[in-house]
Amino acid sequence: MAGIAMIAGSAVAVAPAHAAPVTQAAAKPPPWKNFYAAKLTEGYLHGVAAPGPSSAWAVGHYQDENGYGHAAVLRWNGRAWSQVPSTSLPNMKYWYSVSAATPRDVWVYGWNDVRPGLAHFDGGKWRPVAFPKLPEGTWTSYAQLASVRGATWLAGETWVSRRVGGGWKTTALPAGVHANLITARSATDAWLSGTRYTADGGFQPYTARWNGHRWKQVNIPVGDLSISDMWAESKMSVWVTGQVPSGEEWIPVVLHWNGKKWKNVRIPDEGQTPLAISGNGGKVWVTGDPAGFSGPPLYWRFDGRRWTTVSGALPAGGRAEQVTDLAPVKGTARMWAVGNYIVDEGDVAHSFGLIQRDR
């Protein structure tokens, strides 16, 4: 790993959420619409990617009527979502991450009871891809993909691998670093994030940037921030969301990096735990776990000046659980969102995968 590139500027102050100014837009925002629900029994969707208006992919897990778990890959063809036959893919129990540079360059990562797995779609067929060779005893865990034209990365806990010449080149992360979030804009501009533990400082947030040759740490001046997601909007605009402890509570936080320093972009507190951040059409979207909220999923939308709380659509008979990932639809100003919702049947709660898109 290369040296450390520190960010100039003063520390970012994080005030309690109840003190943050909350403003609402005068015009009612367009609602989100359900496109896929009530089909993945005891399931959830964890990742989504949308390389075009007629091409999107979602991945997750579900159980059959006998209680056996299965991995799920769903495809959007511009008209409807459908499940990819399991025989077209490697035999996995979970598909956890998906990333797509183009409709003909799509990657998925997951695992079964024995090993982790990767697969690639070339526009016509899915093919298994050899997993990066890792040091013995290295965890794969909840690794995440980032694919752009000319480059693909896979980041998992203590390592990050880059696709080079049909194979993988793996780099060990610095001691104490655990990173499982990665986002990329180009082959020479990628970011990863997680935590770093030291005996003196305990757990601290960790971010690093790929400059085309090596990873360089980029310091975040909020020492107790627990990062949940990151999104690289442009070369000079990167967003991070997470939360910081405040007594017995946690405060949701959104930070923006302008190429020189981080700024705390105050976000209204709707009782959510932020899970995902992304954007499109000049808007930034944040969503997360409503902590048992019984209404529809909630989203926060930022237009550059103020935040607006936007309600998602709730399937009939359901209650919100969580929206775990967001993806901008390339070539449009729209967003896809995936997660799961709950249907209560007496004392039994059933989970179903959920896909929504803003209108």
Image: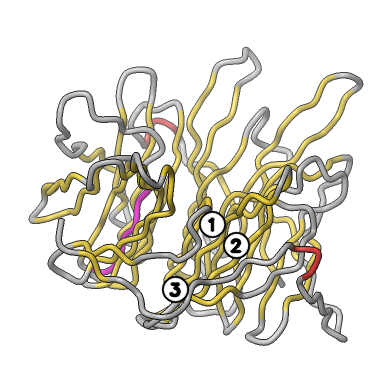
Reading the image, the residue beneath label 1 is 76
Toward which corner of the image does residue 78 lie, by quadrant?
A: bottom right
Q: Nearer the viewer, residue 117 or 230?
A: 230
Q: Nearer the viewer, residue 189 or 176?
A: 176
For marks 3 and 2, give the one nearer the viewer: 3
Residue reaching furthest to the top = 66
In percent of width and height, residue 98 lies at: 42, 50
- Contact? badges 2 and 1 (CB < 8 Å): yes
**Horizontal placement of 344 versus 111: left or right?**
right
In percent of width and height, residue 135 lies at: 15, 31
- Contact? badges 3 and 2 (CB < 8 Å): no
Between the C-alphas of marks 3 and 2, the distance is 20 Å
Q: Is residue 175 above or below residue 113?
A: below
Q: Quadrant of the C terminus?
A: bottom right
Q: Residue at x 54, y 44 (%)?
A: 46
- Contact? badges 1 and 3 (CB < 8 Å): no
Q: Residue at x 41, y 38 (%)?
A: 142
In this figure, what is the number of numbered marks? Answer: 3
Q: Is residue 23 above or below residue 128?
A: below
Toward which corner of the image does residue 285 lie, by quadrant?
A: bottom right
In percent of width and height, residue 236 lies at: 38, 83
Q: Residue at x 64, y 55 (%)?
A: 274
Reading the image, the residue beneath label 3 is 238
Between the C-alphas of marks 2 and 1, the distance is 11 Å
| Disc 2 residue crowd, few under 14, some 14–19, many 20+, Cα 10 Å | many
Toward which corner of the image does residue 278 lie, by quadrant?
A: bottom right
Q: Secondary structure at mark 1?
A: strand
Between the C-alphas of marks 1 and 3, the distance is 28 Å
Q: Which residues are magenta?
A: 144-149
Q: Residue at x 62, y 63 (%)?
A: 253
Reading the image, the residue beneath label 2 is 336
